[in-house]
Image (spheres, rainbow, N blue to C red):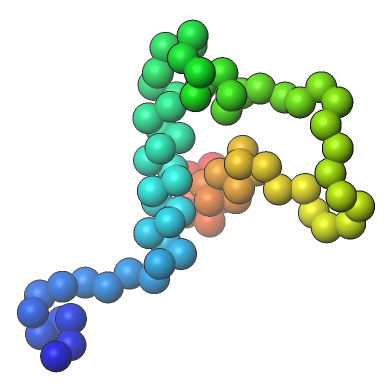
């Protein structure tokens, strides 16, 4: 039985994950500035390090990419 036969729409899982991530970021952005999730979202590390090679991917950079792909930025 196909999903269309029972009136369901199927979306690629990548799209569902991107939308969920953006919904959560919107939720955090509406929080009070003293809340820990908002503080962590806008914080920077002072002296962290990562392994050599590969692109640096932070949660914030992934959200920016999601916004560009979905036409929000």
Task: Note whether 43 is above or below 19 in the view shown.
Answer: above
In the displayed structure image, the side of residue 48 where residue 44 appears, left or right: left
In the displayed structure image, the side of residue 44 where residue 37 appears, left or right: left
Name the one closer to the observer, 2 or 71. 2
Q: Residue furthest top?
A: 34
Does any portion of residue 44 appear in the rendered image?
yes
In the displayed structure image, the side of residue 48 where residue 28 appears, left or right: left
What is the quadrant of residue 29 in the picture?
top left
Task: Note whether 26 is above or below 17 in the view shown.
Answer: above
Name the one closer to the observer, 22 or 39. 39
For the N terminus, the quadrant is: bottom left
For the C terminus, the quadrant is: top right
> Which residue is drawn at the image coordinates 76% and 26% (left, top)?
45
In the displayed structure image, the side of residue 43 where residue 37 appears, left or right: left
Q: Position of residue 22 (x, y in %)?
A: 44, 43
Name the one closer to the observer, 39 or 66. 39
Q: Position of residue 55 (x, y in %)?
A: 80, 54
């Amino acid at each position: 039985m196909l999903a269309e036969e029972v009136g369901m729409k199927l979306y690629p899982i990548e799209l569902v994950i991107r939308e969920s991530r953006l919904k959560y970021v919107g939720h955090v952005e509406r929080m009070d500035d003293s809340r820990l999730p908002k503080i962590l979202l806008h914080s920077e590390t002072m002296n962290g390090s990562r392994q050599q090679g590969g692109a640096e991917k932070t949660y914030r950079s992934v959200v920016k990419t999601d916004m560009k792909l979905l036409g929000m930025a």
